[in-house]
Amino acid sequence: MRQSLLLLALLLPTLAQAWGNHSPMCYRAFERMPEVANAAAVKAEPLVDFLRDQERSIALTLDAQEAWARAHLPGHAPRPEALRFVADAKRSDAERRAAFLRALRLSPQSRLALYLQPDPREAASARPPIDAELVTVTKPGAGATQRFVALQPGEMVAPLAVLASACDEPDYGHDLNLFDDNPGHPDYGFGNQPFGNPAVSIGSQAPFHMGFFHQGPVFNTLAPSFARTFTELRVQQYGTLAVLAWQTGHAYWGWRFAGLALHHVEDLTQPYHASAAPGATLRHMMWVNLKAQLGAPADRQGLVVLQGNRHFVLEQFQTRWIIEAARKQQDGALELALRDTSRDARYPAWSVGYVRDVVAAEAFAAGPATDGAVVVGAPAKFVTDPNFDFAANEAQLGPELARDMQGQRDALQGQIAELLAHFGAHSRNALRGLLKQVYAVSR
């Protein structure tokens, strides 16, 4: 039976994106948070300026990150010594930047360009548009809502815009093909991809954006590879760099790295990223895998397709609703939920265990209700037919989905609003935690 769930790990989950476009949601979540709204404009600077100016401090910070990960993260894959970031004033900016990406174990193709994703609620930006390929390694899909504008070195920019733009950025290829069985992998020491299909490029980022921390001991024994996720590592890496940047006068990169860290926190507010299969019991997963081993794989494949379809439908519905309301400059249930600061204090203060013990635990618990709301709220053919692959037909079916859901969506609206209230509260609590560290260091 253990082997049967290991086979399932090759298929579930393959969806690496949790919320589609994070930026419009982050504009709403932070626009009235005093620490962001009242923060002074910051001067944009290329990454290499920060790296050159703070090379020695960055080296110490990255070493401390690795030591922390080895001490606190179960299943951590130790960083090979050859990837250690060592200060070297004689090397070129390009060499320094490449060394930084290696030490963080990010894709060598990561752009980290100067750009913004404007708030869709505002009028057209006066800044010139920038080609998506200069910002993201991944090719935007037909229904992508991201729009990028150029940011010039030395230009003053609002922290809200920097933060909200960066909240979407880790989906731009930072975590693609980093495992030993991925094509063209960079020898980062992460081992083989623990779940998902290693031959599917976009799926290779899933273990950095998902966290299955609450499946239970039986599931963990039968499918131990699901426990190998690296979301907490990314939060720690980006978060400590944000603190360093703020402390050393590089405020632009403080807000930028903070947004990168928040992305991974926000991904785990999505139940389909905190549970291997929110709509299926462990008994059902074991049963369909046993049947597959006995030569009847249809039910297992159906489970994979249905979970993927429901994830896509939830994401499509949420993204279209947010964008449509933003362009009309209207507030609805989602916008109110994202801004709802009354929930923030219901959670414990930000800590080392917050991502695992608070964010992921809450999303895992919300899994069955979320999956049920999708089934009730969406047209049946999109979420109950295992022979229908929504992802393969997303561009054509998006408008049909939006039209057909008009009379059926109340339950799903309410559940998404609840999830986005979690998204906003955890994002603000995480940011408060990072800013508190800045204050603690400066005293």
Image (spheres, rainbow, N blue to C red):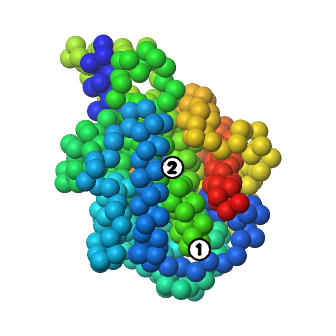
- For badge 2, the amino acid type reads Val
Task: Give residue 249's mark.
Answer: 1
Residue 116 relative to residue 229: left or right: right
Question: What residue is at 62 percent from the left and 77 percent from the top?
Answer: 42
- For badge 1, the amino acid type reads Gly
Residue 209 in the image, given as x and y percentages of width and height: 44, 45
Residue 237 in the image, given as x and y percentages of width and height: 47, 53
Residue 213 in the image, given as x and y percentages of width and height: 49, 30
Which of the image's four quarters has the N terminus? top left
Is residue 438 visible to the viewer in this orientation of the structure? Answer: yes
Closest to the camera, between mark 1 and mark 2, is: 1
Does 15 appear above or below 432? above
Is residue 413 visible to the viewer in this orientation of the structure? Answer: no
Residue 226 relative to residue 27: left or right: left
Residue 404 in the image, given as x and y percentages of width and height: 55, 47
Does 293 appear above or below 442? above
Question: What residue is at 49 percent from the left and 84 percent from the top?
Answer: 153
Cα distance in 3D space between marks 1 and 2: 21 Å
Give the residue pinned by disc 2: 235
